[in-house]
Structures are given as C-alpha cells and as structure tokens.
Amino acid sequence: MTNEISIPDEVKNHPAWIRLEDQRKWYAKKSALNQKNYKRIKLFQIILAASIPIIALIDTAYTKFIVAILGALIAILEGTQQLYQFHTLWTEYRSTAEHLKHEKFLFLSLSGQYRGFDQDEALLLLAQRIEEHISKEHAKWIDMSIKAAPKDSQPQKGG
C-alpha cells in the first residue's frame, strides 16, 4: 500500500505546479548543501582547536609554528563561513522549502487559502502565492548580500 497522492495530469502540467515543484526541490537541495558545508567547516574547526593543546605539549622546534598554523586555519575557516553564510542559507533555504511544501499540501487538500476554490482558481492562487514568497526570499537574499559586501564596494549615495 502506497501513501502516494494522486495528482491530476492537468495539475502536474500546469506552470504553477511545475514552478512549485522546481522551487521546492531547489530550496531543499541548496539547504542540504549549505548544511553539509556548515557542518564540515565547524567539525574541522573543532578538530583543529582540540589539537592545539595536544600539539603544544610536544616539545619540538616546530611546535610554535604548527600551533600558529592551526590557529590561522581556524580563523580562515570561520572567515569562509562568514563570507559564504552557510548557516544562514541552510536555515533560510530549509524554511522556504518547508513553506513551499506546506503550500503544496494546502493546495492539494483545497484548504486554507484554497478553500472553496475550483481547481483552476486554486492553481491561479497557487501561482501568486509561490511567486510572492519567492520574491520575498529573493529580496532578503539581495539585502543580505548588500550587508555582507565590503563597505568600499557598495554604491555611494548621491553621486
């Protein structure tokens, strides 16, 4: 017995449904990728940081040099995480993917905003709601990108 929901072909082939599925999958995939990158960086930082006191106990001519390199690598990894915002993107993309999934199930059950609509009306509303949410997400991304850019690379006002 499968729990697969039967979706009519006219829905599956509608641009709103295609867009919903495309965006939902894209956000889920990008969320997973950013989660993986974030966790890899953090795990590597933990390993490097934990190795510093152990290496510091070793009495060789190179100990200070090795400890300094490890500290620099930790700083480089943290700078990379801040630059690429893996944690922020992971959580924001996951949130958007879940929102789109929620929208999908409201549409399929003709509940919430879709209650009382026929299929064609519901598909039009679905298209509007998807685009509104994706536009908001895009605006947040632009705002975050501008804030993350160095001050000297941002356009100057009034000139």
Image (cartoon, grey):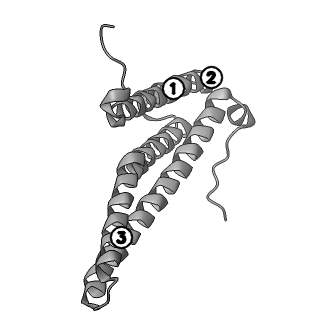
Q: Dot 1: within a 10 Å radius of its alpha carbon, few (fewer than 14), some, or many (20 or more) residues?
A: some
Q: Going by the image, does 20 lie left or right of 11? A: left
Quarter of image, res 146: top left
Q: CA distance from mark 2 to mark 3?
A: 62 Å
- N-terminal label among 2 and 3: 3
Residue visible at 42% across and 59% down in the picture? 38
Residue 8 picture location, percent across and down: 70, 38
Query: Of the residues shown, which amino acid type is indicated by label 1?
Result: Glu
Q: Going by the image, does 154 lie left or right of 96? A: left
Q: State the count of labels.
A: 3
Residue 123 picture location, percent across and down: 59, 26
Of the two numbered discs 1 and 2 in the rendering, the one whose residue sits closer to the viewer:
1
Residue under label 1: 131
Residue 123 versus residue 159 in the image, above or below: below
Q: CA distance from mark 1 to mark 2?
A: 17 Å
Of the two numbered discs 2 and 3 in the rendering, the one whose residue sits closer to the viewer:
3
Q: In this orientation, which residue lies closer to the viewer: 22 or 35? A: 35
Residue 150 versus residue 25 in the image, above or below: above
Query: Of the residues shown, which amino acid type is indicated by label 2?
Result: Asp
Residue 45 versus residue 135 in the image, above or below: below
Residue visible at 64% across and 54% down in the picture? 4
Residue visible at 57% across and 21% down in the picture? 124
Residue under label 3: 69
Tag shown at residue 120: 2
- Whether residue 143 appears in this view of the structure is yes
Q: Dot 3: within a 10 Å radius of its alpha carbon, few (fewer than 14), some, or many (20 or more) residues?
A: some
The extreme front residue here reads: 61
Query: Of the residues shown, which amino acid type is indicated by label 3?
Result: Ile
